[in-house]
Image (cartoon, rainbow, N blue to C red):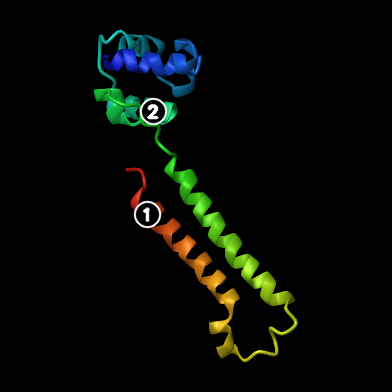
Amino acid sequence: MTIGSRIKKQREEIRLSIDELSKILSIPLNTLTQYEKDEILPTKNDLRKLANYFEVSKKYLLEGGKVEKEINKQYLNFALLGLGILTILSYFLVMLFMTDFFKQPNIMLIFNGYTVVLFIGIIFIAISIFLLVTNRKK
């Protein structure tokens, strides 16, 4: 299977005409047609657009093999960030509405089970920030 046939196969799987794909990705129709007919190879930028749109790796489009759908890493990162923020907010809401909270010495909060929730939220946020920084698109 060639790169052109893989592009065409991906396009047909999502039931798009070549004209529609051309408009969505801002790739000229004649250029996209030439890609699918293997008359020319896609530019790096067009290859990136196609791989991102089809949610496959650039390697798959270029070399073939098993179709591996790429997980959109940004969605995963933002999900982790949101989960961390919600975890920390829930910790503070629980602490705010606990009647014993203000009666306990602060040192006791370290051993409080709810503090574990706070640390889990911080870990989620730290992982999310790490992934955002290391997976930033170049």
114 left or right of 27? right
Q: Residue at x 63, y 66 (%)?
A: 89
Above or below, 71 relative to 89: above
The residues tagged by marks 1 and 2 sit, at their Cα atoms, a distance apart of: 21 Å
Q: Quadrant of residue 115?
A: bottom right
Above or below, 117 relative to 21: below
Q: Is residue 22 visible?
A: no
Q: Secondary structure at mark 1?
A: helix
Above or below, 62 relative to 138: above
Amino acid identity at mark 1: Val
Residue 103: % across, % down: 70, 90
Residue 138: % across, % down: 32, 43
Residue 133: which disc? 1
Q: Residue at x 35, y 27 (%)?
A: 67
Residue 72: % across, % down: 44, 39
Residue under pointer 2: 49
Q: Quadrant of the N terminus?
A: top left
